[in-house]
Amino acid sequence: MKKFWKWKNKMVTNQENPMQTEERTLYLNGTIAEESWFDDDVTPQLFKEELMAGSGNITVWINSPGGDCVAAAQIYNMLMDYPHDVTVKIDGIAASAASVIAMAGTKVLMSPVSMLMIHNPMTVAMGDTVEMQKAIEMLGSVKDSIINAYEIKTGLSRAKLSHLMDAETWMDAGKAVELGFADGIMNRSEAAEDMEPPAVSMLYSKANVINSLMDKIAAKCAIPQKPDVQEVTGRSVDELQAALNAIKNFM
């Protein structure tokens, strides 16, 4: 297991209160889970334990071209369930699966020179026309789940978000704020101390998928819809289980 996240905690003094408080910062740098979390129970549990090990507000710095959709969905859900404010700061790039994680922020801020990208999930599948149709249906389900996260943050219609994903939309900080994916632009003085350039290539459309899906992906790669949005129905886990090759990377 290769960790793609790092915590840094330090004590700071509040100007209004002489007492020191702990400032927690989470850094997400590079590919989100080079090895998929869909059949991994240990790594997600480790991430959750570290997240819940402290208290108070946290800052999440993101500089990532994307990665595993299962890991992204689980991290998103964990951050959404965190009982304190989560400030997301995009320093460089938040593309593909990394953009999903960014949507968990109570507040999302972007560097003036950073980029955010959203697009459709991808996979590689083998088999006859029946298997190909099942792969198409699974990709549709994953896309619906990802749209849930974007819709909750932006308030845009599902149709609008779907069109943006179809077009592989790149947004600078200003456009991301305009569309609701971000809440503001960081000042020049704000910069991550421990961020490094993502150790991956810039080929965001590469489908790097080799494993077969199991029924647990339906539960692990899921983001709840807004309460007033009717859930998509009509496909059971059993129908999706048969012969799909993995959506190991949502890129």
Image: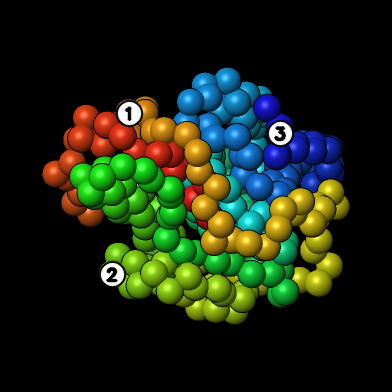
The percent coordinates of residue 205 (x first, y second) are 54, 61
Whether residue 139 is visible here, answered yes or no, is yes
> Which amino acid is tagged 3?
Lys
Mark 3 residue crowding within 10 angstroms, few (<14) / some (14–19) / many (20+): few
Q: Nearer the viewer, residue 67 or 116?
A: 67
Residue 151 image point, x, y percent:
37, 60
Is residue 81 at all visible to an observer of this figure?
no
Cα gap from disc 3 to disc 2, whole angstroms: 36 Å
Q: Which of the 4 image quarters holds residue 2? A: top right
Question: Which residue in the rendered view is the most extreme toward the left?
Answer: 234
| The N terminus, quarter of image | top right
In this image, 98 relative to 112: left or right?
A: left
Q: Are marks 3 and 2 in contact (CB under 8 Å)?
A: no
Residue toward you, 123 or 164? 123
Q: Secondary structure at mark 2?
A: helix
* Residue at numbered disc 1: 215
Relative to 231, is 159 above or below?
Answer: below
User: Picture coordinates of residue 211 (x, y %)?
Assistant: 47, 34
Residue behind mark 3: 3
Residue tagged by mark 2?
Answer: 159
Q: Residue at x 62, y 44 (%)?
A: 32
Task: Decide: few, some or many residues near mark 2? Use Cα within 10 Å; few <14, some 14-19, many ≥20.
Answer: few
